[in-house]
Amino acid sequence: MPEDATAYMTGAEYAADPVGPSFDPQKTAEALRAGTSPEELTTRSWAVDAG
């Protein structure tokens, strides 16, 4: 929904980190091989914790 995107982009989380967390492809691949689900690997909380 466009309203959801607008709300997110005007919210506190986006204002605090508009670029988003760093992405380490090696850590992501290792986590996937270790059994972490793709759904979890695409969450912001996983990216922040792994970063």
Image (spheres, rainbow, N blue to C red):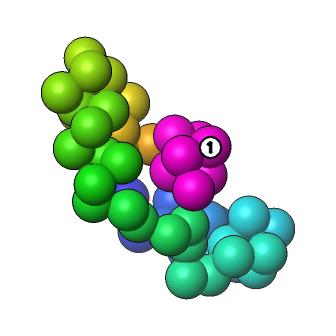
Q: Is residue 42 above or below residue 4?
A: above
Q: Residue at x 31, y 46 (%)?
A: 28
Q: Is residue 46 above or below residue 21?
A: above
Indicate left or right for 31 with 43 as reference: left
Front residue (pair 14, 17): 17
Where residue 36 appears, x then y in whole percent?
Answer: 31, 23
Disc 1 marks which residue?
49
- Observer able to see residue 44: no
Q: Residue at x 18, y 27 (%)?
A: 33
Please say whether residue 1 is one of the residues in the magenta stretch. no
Q: Is residue 28 above or below residue 13?
A: above
- Observer able to see residue 17: yes
* Residue type at tag 1: Asp
Where residue 46 appears, x then y in whole percent?
Answer: 51, 40
Q: Residue at x 32, y 33 (%)?
A: 31
Span highlighted in magenta in the image: 45-51
